[in-house]
Image: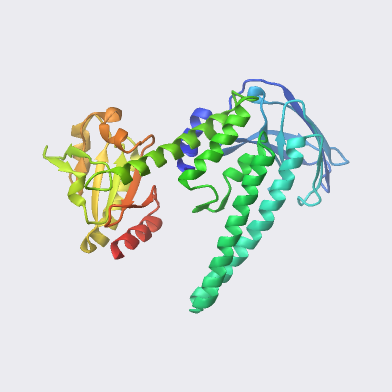
């Protein structure tokens, strides 16, 4: 789900429209007559808003126009150190006191910012526990201490469950708070988001519905709605696969480079990758080269690839894929391809890894190491 948010960033990025203002008065001990950097979170990237000049007492102030008249996340940093995270709402007059090293932070005059400090403190504490346990597990694994590895893995699982339960409780307790965004998009590491199950879409929808009544134009509301829709589409696909006859996944029948109809069902009983991609994107064309290396590594173990190209320019597609030895198909219908409808595809590229039973074992893994590991797993089953 994390991919949907990134794909929407450009469309949802905050514009320069003026809304109601919020004010910041900050005092940084140890940063007299210095530059502070004020930044804003624009969905999935951080942009610099302004440079604040502190006086001899380390004080500075600024008034900010809040786009869409809705809360947003702001950060204040000094010499590369983040001093404060703020969640400013229209009309806020935030008073911030902090040391130049980011310690002893105090925030008043902004209820959402105050609540954000509590959320951040809880997340930081649990993240330290997660990182410590992860290091211990790696060390035990390297010396072959299987019993300790299993024990630590159990502790990590228990930590994950407790943190997710706490985040859900926070959502129920504070249904109209933007601080829930901090929890819903939390990641223990880059490959371990806290809310990644397809059933988690209900929480994104719940928050979007709660915030929309007060802030209908907020880009965060739109992003949450897209995230929820993606999860529900994935649930629908999962249900469709479970209900499918003969094979466990929706059929695709499309012409290959020789105009022969190739059916996805011909791969039944084999581990395979199903890829939907766009040849107009250079990074997606380059991904095929990495995919070729993985295919050559595992084809001896039965791996197959069924690649669906979404384009109306079949000649261009043919010139690109002629070198690749797997099944390449294209119906020439572009975004109107029925294959997209069959698998509820809303973003490209999209990748599924199926095991020999026809079950989805993983999806949307595009880094070479992660994909190699996932493919190796289904080939060994």
- Relative placement, left or right, of 43 versus 371 is right
Q: Which residue is at 22% across, 60% downward? A: 302
x and y percentages locating residue 109 in the rendered image: 81, 34
Picture quadrant where residue 85 is located: top right
For residue 346, above or below residue 290? above
For residue 242, above or below residue 151? above
Residue placed most toward the observer, 78 or 243: 243
Q: Coloured how?
A: rainbow
Q: Quadrant of the C terminus?
A: bottom left
Residue placed most toward the observer, 51 or 355: 355
For residue 154, above or below residue 274? below
| Residue 9 shows in the view | yes
Picture quadrant where residue 125 is located: bottom right
Q: Which residue is at 52% across, 71% downward? A: 150
Residue placed most toward the observer, 3 or 146: 146
Q: Which residue is at 30% across, 41% downward? A: 276
x and y percentages locating residue 59 in the rendered image: 84, 38
| Residue 44 shows in the view | no
x and y percentages locating residue 157 in the rendered image: 55, 61
x and y percentages locating residue 322 in the rendered image: 17, 44
Tally of numbered tags: 0
Residue placed most toward the observer, 305 or 97: 305
């Amino acid at each position: 789900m994390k991919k949907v948010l990134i794909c929407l960033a450009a469309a949802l990025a905050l514009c320069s429209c003026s809304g109601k203002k919020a004010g910041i008065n900050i005092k940084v001990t140890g940063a007299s007559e210095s530059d502070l950097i004020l930044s804003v979170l624009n969905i999935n990237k951080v942009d610099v808003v302004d440079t604040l000049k502190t006086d001899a007492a380390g004080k500075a102030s600024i008034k900010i126009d809040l786009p869409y008249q809705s809360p947003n996340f702001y950060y204040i940093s000094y010499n590369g150190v983040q001093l404060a995270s703020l969640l400013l709402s229209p009309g806020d007059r935030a008073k911030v006191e902090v040391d130049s090293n980011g310690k002893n932070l105090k925030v008043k005059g902004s209820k959402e910012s105050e609540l954000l400090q509590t959320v951040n403190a809880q997340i930081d504490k649990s993240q330290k526990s997660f990182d410590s346990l992860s290091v211990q597990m790696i060390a035990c694994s390297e010396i072959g201490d299987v019993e300790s590895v299993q024990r630590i893995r159990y502790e990590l699982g228990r930590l994950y469950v407790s943190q997710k339960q706490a985040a859900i409780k926070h959502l129920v307790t504070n249904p109209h708070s933007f601080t829930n965004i901090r929890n819903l998009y939390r990641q223990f590491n880059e490959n371990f988001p806290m809310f990644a199950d397809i059933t988690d879409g209900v929480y994104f929808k719940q928050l979007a519905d709660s915030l929309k009544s007060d802030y209908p134009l907020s880009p965060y509301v739109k992003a949450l709605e897209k995230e929820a829709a993606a999860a529900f589409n994935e649930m629908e696909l999962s249900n469709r696969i479970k209900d499918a006859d003969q094979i466990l996944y929706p059929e695709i029948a499309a012409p290959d480079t020789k105009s022969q109809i190739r059916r996805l069902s011909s791969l039944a009983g084999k581990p395979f990758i199903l890829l939907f991609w766009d040849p107009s994107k250079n990074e997606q064309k380059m991904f095929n080269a990495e995919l070729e290396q993985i295919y050559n590594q595992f084809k001896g173990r039965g791996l197959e690839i069924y690649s669906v190209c979404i384009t109306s320019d079949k000649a261009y597609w043919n010139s690109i894929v002629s070198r690749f030895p797997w099944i390449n198909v294209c119906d020439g219908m572009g975004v109107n391809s029925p294959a997209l409808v069959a698998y509820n595809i809303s973003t490209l590229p999209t990748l599924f890894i199926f095991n020999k039973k026809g079950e989805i074992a993983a999806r949307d893994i595009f880094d070479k190491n992660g994909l190699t590991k996932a493919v190796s797993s289904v080939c060994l089953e």
